[in-house]
């Protein structure tokens, strides 16, 4: 279970000095696309709290926790973009600041030692509290992040360092950053989007109040996340495969219609929350067009009946359920699928903006697995073929490795991909890198499995012990299923054959 306590983190929304208050500019960074966690996302400089952060004295701050988080945020900004937010820094030359940076990075001095040694001090009056956001439990890493709004010192120019996890850093007008989000060009986590949206309205006496006006800025769990406009990701708790604990339900909407994809929670409290989110969309005069299923697994379909019962009680009618024919056949007895979705069929949501989703039959994880591709925005709803958290199980006979690799190749060939909205975890902002990683991971495994068979290792159990050395013994039963899927593929490829003595041998 992903029940780990979120780790304390601090982040700074750095404001450019001298910018027009009606059109403020902030310094944002792009996380490296090579990072497994939120690779390619836009963010503000920040990071995890270290134990020495509490050893820094912060002027005008009586609360030790807040002081430690100010210290954390200031240290992270210095480490990530070389801006020293300390009183006394204004007398340092660029060269002196660079040598301080080296002192800290090389470990010659700790952060508190460095501040004391150079007679620098942090002052809480320089750090305006702008909210505290907790990462929802759908992510593999979770933070309880304190955001501070800070004026960048006039003589310091932020820059990303070469060996950092950041690809780039730039000043940008908040209004332009928001416009980039509106054009589906970038991904930001909810607190960054909230900050950008808030600042895009200009700076005035109410700015801080507007930052703090949403419950999520006070550690309330974030439920509804709009990583791309008109695509709401609403993770619901499900009995899914660990380490994931949630399945992403997607609500795609226009001015007139809503499509619900994978309402997967069997739990009443979660179904109620999802129902309330759908109600909000309906209150603006929209209709639910359809409930659409990516595939047959219970953690993607278990909330269908509850959602339909809810909609029926609200509107007097249930909405049609649509899925691939093989999914529909497997679900017989649980509920009726009203309509089959075929490969290459385009599902259109009418209204503003009109959204066209092309269905792609992409079997492998499940026979009737569907992905949905929005060519205009580059969004691909990847279902469980690619996920943002956990790994994808290919379990025969529902799972088929040959089909899976062909499906990944088909996804890889789509033009203009900007994001993968998977069935679990945060959206993937580096789609092509991620798909390549999935393909090479599987091919590497396959190669090692084939090598093992050629050396005479012949049962899935033995192969797991030999090849899955990076997997804990607890997961070996599942790994055996994956090995079986690989062996089936190798057999179909004519590279191994199934022997009468229940063993696999090389051809
Ligand atoms: Zn699945």
Image (cartoon, helix red, strand yellow):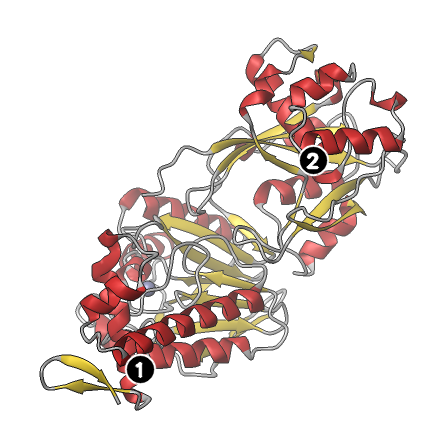
Residues at circles 2 and 1 in contact by the CB criterion of under 8 Å? no
**Residue 66 location, quadrant:** top right
Say which of 214 and 428 sits in front. Answer: 428
Question: Residue at 75% across / 16% down in the picture?
Answer: 117
User: Is residue 414 rendered to the left or right of residue 130?
Assistant: left
Label 1 packing within 10 angstroms: few (<14), some (14-19), many (20+): some
Question: Residue at 36% across / 57% down in the picture?
Answer: 263
- Local secondary structure at mark 1: helix
The N terminus, quarter of image: top left
**Mark carried by residue 220:** none
Disc 2 designates what residue?
Answer: 79
Residue 326 versus residue 318 in the image, above or below:
below
Q: Residue 7: image x %, image y %?
A: 48, 32
Q: Residue 77: image x %, image y %?
A: 70, 34
Pointer 2 or 1: first along the chain: 2
Disc 1 designates what residue?
Answer: 489
Residue 401 visible here: yes
Say which of 214 and 64 sits in front. Answer: 64
Count of number-bearing discs: 2
């Amino acid at each position: 279970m992903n029940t780990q306590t979120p780790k304390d983190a601090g982040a700074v929304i750095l404001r450019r000095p001298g910018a027009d208050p009606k059109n403020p500019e902030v310094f944002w960074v792009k996380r490296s696309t090579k990072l497994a966690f939120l690779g390619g996302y836009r963010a503000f400089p920040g990071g995890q709290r270290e134990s020495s952060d509490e050893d820094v004295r912060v002027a005008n701050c009586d609360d030790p926790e807040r002081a430690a988080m100010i210290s954390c945020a200031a240290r992270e900004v210095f480490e990530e973009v070389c801006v020293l937010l300390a009183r006394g820094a204004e007398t340092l030359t660029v060269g002196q600041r660079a040598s301080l940076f080296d002192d800290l990075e090389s470990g010659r001095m700790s952060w508190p030692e460095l501040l004391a040694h150079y007679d620098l001090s942090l002052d809480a009056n320089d750090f305006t509290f702008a909210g505290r956001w907790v990462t929802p439990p759908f992510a593999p890493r979770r933070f309880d992040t304190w955001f501070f709004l800070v004026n960048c010192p006039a003589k310091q120019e932020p820059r990303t360092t070469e060996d950092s996890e950041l690809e780039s850093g730039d000043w940008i007008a908040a209004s332009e950053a928001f416009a980039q989000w509106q054009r589906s060009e970038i991904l930001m986590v909810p607190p960054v989007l909230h900050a950008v949206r808030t600042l895009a309205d200009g700076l005035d006496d109410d700015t801080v109040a507007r930052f703090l006006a949403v419950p999520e800025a006070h550690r309330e769990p974030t439920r509804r996340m709009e990583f791309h406009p008109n695509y709401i990701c609403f993770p619901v708790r499900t009995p899914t495969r660990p380490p994931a604990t949630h399945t992403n339900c997607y609500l795609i909407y226009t001015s007139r219609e809503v499509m619900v994809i994978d309402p997967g929670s069997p739990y009443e409290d979660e179904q109620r929350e999802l129902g309330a989110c759908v109600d909000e969309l309906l209150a603006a005069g929209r209709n639910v067009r359809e409930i659409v299923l990516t595939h047959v697994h219970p953690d993607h379909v278990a909330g269908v009946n509850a959602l339909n019962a809810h909609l029926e009680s609200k509107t007097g009618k249930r909405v049609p359920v649509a899925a691939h024919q093989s999914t529909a056949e497997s679900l017989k007895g649980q509920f009726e699928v009203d309509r089959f979705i075929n490969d290459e069929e385009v599902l259109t949501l009418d209204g503003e903006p009109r959204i066209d989703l092309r269905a792609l039959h992409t079997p492998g994880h499940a026979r009737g697995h569907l992905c949905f591709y929005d060519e205009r925005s580059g969004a691909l709803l990847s279902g469980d073929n690619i996920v943002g958290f956990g790994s994808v199980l290919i379990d025969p006979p529902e799972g088929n490795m040959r089909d899976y690799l062909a499906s990944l190749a088909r996804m890889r060939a789509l033009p203009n991909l900007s994001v993968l909205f998977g069935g679990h975890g945060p959206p993937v902002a580096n789609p092509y890198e991620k798909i390549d990683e999935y393909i090479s991971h599987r091919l590497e495994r396959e190669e090692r499995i084939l090598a093992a068979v050629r050396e005479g290792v012949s049962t899935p159990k033995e192969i797991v012990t030999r090849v899955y050395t990076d997997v804990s013994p607890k997961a070996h039963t599942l790994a055996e299923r994956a090995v079986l899927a690989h062996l089936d593929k190798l057999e179909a490829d004519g590279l191994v054959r199934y022997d009468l003595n229940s063993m696999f041998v090389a051809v």
